Amino acid sequence: MKRALAVVGSAAVVALAIVGLLTLATGVLEDDASSATGAAAPVEPGVINRIYDSASPGVVFIQAEVVPRQRAPIGPRPRRSVSTGTGFVIDDEGRILTNAHVVEDARRVRVRFSESELVDATVTGRDAANDLALLKVGRSVARR
């Protein structure tokens, strides 16, 4: 469990670094007067498309079948629902970082890579305080 949380923490640092790089690459942060006024800085043509083309293969759709915790011992049984979200592949071992609230109380978690079918995933780590969760799919699935 400690190893899984360490991977989640490392992935969070990587995610923050990616956000920082995207912010710098798109010119959102500037040290001039235009940023103080809220005006968008000019972006080099094609930068957003290049970032998307580079990052999109690692973005996945996540579907979790959820059974909410029963709040009272008396009354109707909790109904199943579906929670959805996104995540991104962090290595070629099949680890995926997502938000913890997406997989909270999940009985089954499945992941879709691009246009592929849903494949089963397991929750291997969770940090509810930072709303992060680590999922795992098979290596062969992650390398598609």
Image (cartoon, rainbow, N blue to C red):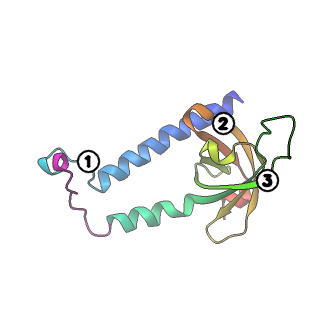
Residue 104: numbered disc: none
Magenta segment range?
A: 35-46
Q: Can you say which quadrant of the picture contains the N terminus?
A: top right
Q: Name the residue under label 1.
A: 29
Residue ID at (55%, 63%): 57
Q: Where is residue 25 in the image (x, y as percent from the top left)?
A: 31, 54
Farthest bottom residue in view:
115
Q: Which of 26 and 86 is in front in this view?
A: 86
Q: Tag 3: residue type? A: Arg
Answer left or right for 33 relative to 65: left
Q: Tag 1: residue type? A: Leu
Q: Which of 87 and 81 is in front in this view?
A: 81
Above or below 115: residue 12: above
Above or below 12: residue 53: below
Q: Tag 2: residue type? A: Arg
Query: Helix or strand or loop: what does disc 2 sit on?
Result: strand
Above or below 47: residue 69: above
Farthest left residue in view:
33
Residue ID at (69%, 46%): 103
Q: Mark 2 points at which residue?
A: 126
Q: Name the residue under label 3.
A: 80
Farthest top residue in view:
2
Verify CB contact (< 8 Å) between mark 2 and mark 1.
no
Q: In which quarter of the image is residue 86?
A: bottom right
